[in-house]
Image (spheres, grey):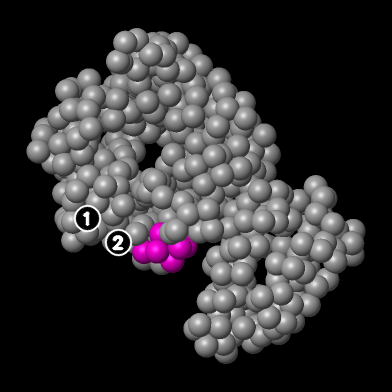
């Protein structure tokens, strides 16, 4: 699938699939076992579920590779060299379901999304995992999914913007397939790492993703409440894949109480808002997707008035600001000569809700690898301590390559102040 094909498809409502994990549990997936190994031992169970989702109206199936990254599989005792084969075989199950369906339903084509999800580890300095290590983990998984024949990617249930960003970069280093990203939020409306949904949208949409939204977290009402403010600023279609209501515990079982008709009724309100990609997460079944599909078919909802591009806003990943000439004039311009002084200089700035910093770095384009690594480490550490969005001065074309390398590790949407028409992926050009 090309990005243009996805754009055309998403002009009308797209029905995603429903839950897989909770369905497998209902089919006697043993507690504590490796779900991916169990599915490969019982592939017909997944195939039957995904065929049922096709019948229910799903246009995009998620390959069962949510937990198939290296760290998760090794936690279950698998060897590192087994990771590519597991991803290939798991995605192949979904691709075979897709191919069989498409052959007999040429007017209702179904697509398969390779699924990347959290590793369970934390990035430094909160954890021990480096950004490059994480990117490599996602790359090896994504490469196998591409080889298996997936049509696009979904990065889902992400609780940390920096890790979602690593997954996007990993995919983009390999291919130009469409990417959907969905975060998951805590009850207070931010990710576990403290990112707001606006921070996430600004950062990820600037990296050329094709859809953005939420999955899991809560039921339909709460996801709609969180997503609605993004409609006026998002140039990409919004996605909602909620649980079947808030879970409750009955003995040793987790119950998701929302029935298919009620689920579809609440999801219809999200469609009325203009959220065009809808499906289900924990507790949803083919019956939920059937009810949703029938409800959406009556509406033929389209998102109207989607902005052509992101607004002039920058983000640190934990705070976002609109950029105008007054902000540019008020920013403290700091010249940083070496990476060791970066944090000290930033800590001296008055860090308030309306502040940003303007950084003038030396030319980094010809630095040795070790010296450049010192700059990237300093930037990552600074981001963990300071919430201010950052704007970087770029006074010559020569500086662009060095800035690109360093800003690969900036987990927000940086500003670039330059008189030249330069392009740094993920950044907002200011002049």
Image quadrant in which you'd find residue 216: top left
Residue placed at 40% from the left, 64% from the top?
A: 133
Would residue 312 appear left or right of 308 to someone viewing this image?
A: right
Q: Position of residue 302 (x, y in %)?
A: 54, 33
Rendered image quadrant of residue 17 = top left
Q: Where on the picture, by quarter, is residue 342?
A: bottom right
* Distance CA(mark 2)–CA(mark 1): 8 Å
Range covered by the magenta-colored residues: 130-136
Query: Where is mark 1, residue-wise?
Result: 83
Q: Is residue 132 magenta?
A: yes
| Residue that numbered label 2 is attached to | 140
Is the residue 408 above or below the residue 40 in the image?
below
In terms of secondary structure, where does tag 2 sit?
Answer: helix
User: Magenta span has 309?
Assistant: no
Disc 2: CA contacts within 10 A as few (<14), some (14-19) or many (>=20)? some
Residue 269 badge: none
Query: Circle 1 — which element?
Result: helix
Q: Check the picture and name the quadrant holding the C terminus.
A: bottom right
């Amino acid at each position: 699938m090309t990005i243009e094909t996805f754009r055309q498809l998403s002009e009308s409502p797209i029905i995603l699939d429903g839950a897989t994990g909770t369905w497998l549990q209902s089919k006697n997936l043993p507690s504590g076992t490796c779900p991916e190994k169990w599915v490969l031992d019982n592939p017909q169970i997944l195939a039957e579920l995904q065929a049922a989702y096709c019948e229910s109206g799903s246009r995009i199936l998620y390959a069962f590779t949510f937990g198939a990254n290296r760290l998760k599989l090794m936690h279950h005792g698998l060897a590192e060299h087994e990771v590519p084969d597991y991803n290939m075989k798991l995605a192949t199950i979904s691709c075979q379901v897709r191919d069989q369906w498409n052959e007999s339903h040429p007017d209702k084509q179904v697509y398969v999304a390779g699924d990347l999800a959290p590793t369970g580890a934390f990035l430094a300095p909160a954890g021990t995992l480096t950004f490059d290590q994480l990117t490599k983990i996602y790359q090896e998984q994504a490469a196998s999914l591409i080889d298996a024949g997936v049509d696009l990617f979904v990065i889902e249930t992400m609780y940390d913007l920096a890790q979602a960003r690593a997954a996007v970069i990993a995919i983009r280093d390999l291919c130009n397939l469409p990417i959907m990203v969905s975060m998951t939020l805590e009850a207070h409306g931010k990710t576990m790492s403290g990112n707001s949904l606006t921070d996430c949208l600004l950062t990820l949409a600037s990296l050329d993703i094709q859809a953005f939204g939420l999955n899991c977290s809560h039921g339909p009402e709460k996801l709609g409440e969180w997503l609605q403010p993004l409609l006026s600023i998002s140039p990409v279609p919004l996605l909602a894949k909620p649980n079947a209501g808030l879970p409750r515990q009955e003995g040793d079982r987790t119950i998701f109480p929302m029935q298919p008709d009620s689920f579809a009724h609440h999801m219809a309100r999200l469609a009325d808002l203009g959220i065009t990609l809808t499906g289900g997460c924990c507790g949803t079944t083919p019956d939920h997707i059937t009810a949703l599909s029938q409800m959406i078919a009556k509406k033929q909802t389209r998102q109207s008035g989607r902005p052509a591009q992101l607004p002039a806003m920058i983000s640190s990943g934990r705070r976002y600001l609109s950029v105008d000439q007054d902000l540019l004039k008020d920013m403290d311009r700091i010249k940083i000569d070496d990476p060791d002084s970066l944090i000290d200089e930033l800590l001296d700035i008055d860090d308030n809700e309306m502040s940003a910093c303007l950084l003038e770095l030396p030319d980094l384009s010809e630095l040795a690898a070790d010296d450049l690594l010192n700059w990237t480490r300093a930037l990552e550490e600074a981001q963990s301590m300071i919430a201010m969005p950052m704007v970087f001065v770029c006074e010559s074309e020569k500086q662009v390559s060095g800035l690109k390398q360093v800003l690969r590790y900036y987990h927000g949407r940086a500003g670039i102040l330059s008189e030249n028409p330069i392009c740094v992926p993920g950044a907002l050009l200011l002049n």
